[in-house]
Amino acid sequence: MKLFSGTINSLEQALKYSSTRQKTISHNIANVDTPNYKAKDVSFKTELNQSINANKTSALHIDFSGGRSSSVKVVNSIGNQYNHNGNNVDIDKEMSSLAENQIYFNAVADRISSKFNSLKTVVKGGK
Amino acid sequence: MTIFHSLNNSASALTAGRLRMDVISSNMANVDTTRGQYVDGQWQPYKRKVVTTQASESQFTNLLNRAMNQSVGHGVKVTRIEEDDSPAKLVYQPEHPDANDQGYVAMPNVDPLKEMVDLISATRSYEANVTVFNASKGLLMKSLEIGK
């Protein structure tokens, strides 16, 4: 039995997604008046279950474990209305994403914090 | 990508927003300036100035990241301050020292209404960026508390 289960790894991925999303939102809002700027979005959930498995013909072959960082992908958001200056940043959508992302980050940070705390309890033997 | 990336993004937008407001205030201040530039022995009226911006992502690391679908961009940058080349407004004022032979004075091509609309737009986007800055700061402070 492992001391560090997959929980911390999953939470780390979630934190990474959330901080990338924060950067993307700040970039979108920074460019709210830039002509021809196209809004960006981060995809994460759809990629999570589609991890590529290495087709190993020998047990010595190394897995595609380096691809962990690729679970977060920055894409141009599509299907928005364009302004007259070619900019498609929807400020209302960005501000609500910002609020949502803040709560999400706080929730995940709380989870990972209490995970460490329960590990601490285990290590100290409940003292 | 550093931890202060999102703060830098917002900061660049705040700088650009402040410059836009500076230029707008310059335009408003010079709404009646008939002597903006001295060209070929003649005074030209002040010309309205416009700030042009561009998404800042020309650095190599950013282009590489974009190819790998990892680029989040580097905020906004001001490319230049351009002059509006629309014609000057002619006002009939024969007693004015800068009037031409027909008694018309060339006034700056500044439209106060347009400037006010631009000013409100600049103010709003500045406020939005301040909000984003504070949100990013909150996230950073929260991540410092992990494990406490």
Image (cartoon, coloured by chain):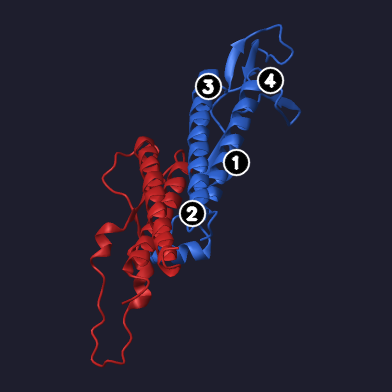
Chain colours: A red, B blue
Which callout, 3 or 4, points at the residue further toward the start of the chain?
Answer: 4
- The dot on residue A1 is none
Q: Residues within 10 Å of mark 2 (few under 14, many from 20)?
A: some
Tell me if label 2 and label 3 are in contact, CB under 8 Å: no
Horizontally, residue B33 falls left or right of residue B134, namely right
> Which residue appears at 53% of the width and 26% of the height?
B119
Mark nearest the camera among 4 and 2 is: 2
Question: Residue under circle 3?
Answer: B116
Alpha carbon of mark 4 to alpha carbon of mark 2: how far? 56 Å
Mark nearest the camera among 2 and 1 is: 2
Mark nearest the camera among 3 and 4 is: 3
> Which residue appears at 48% of the width and 62% of the height?
B62
Element type where label 4 sits in the image? loop
Question: Residue under circle 2?
Answer: B143
Question: Residue under circle 1?
Answer: B15
Amino acid type at mark 2 = Ser
Mark nearest the camera among 1 and 4 is: 1
Whether callout 3 and callout 4 share a subunit is answered yes
Alpha carbon of mark 2 to alpha carbon of mark 3: how far? 41 Å
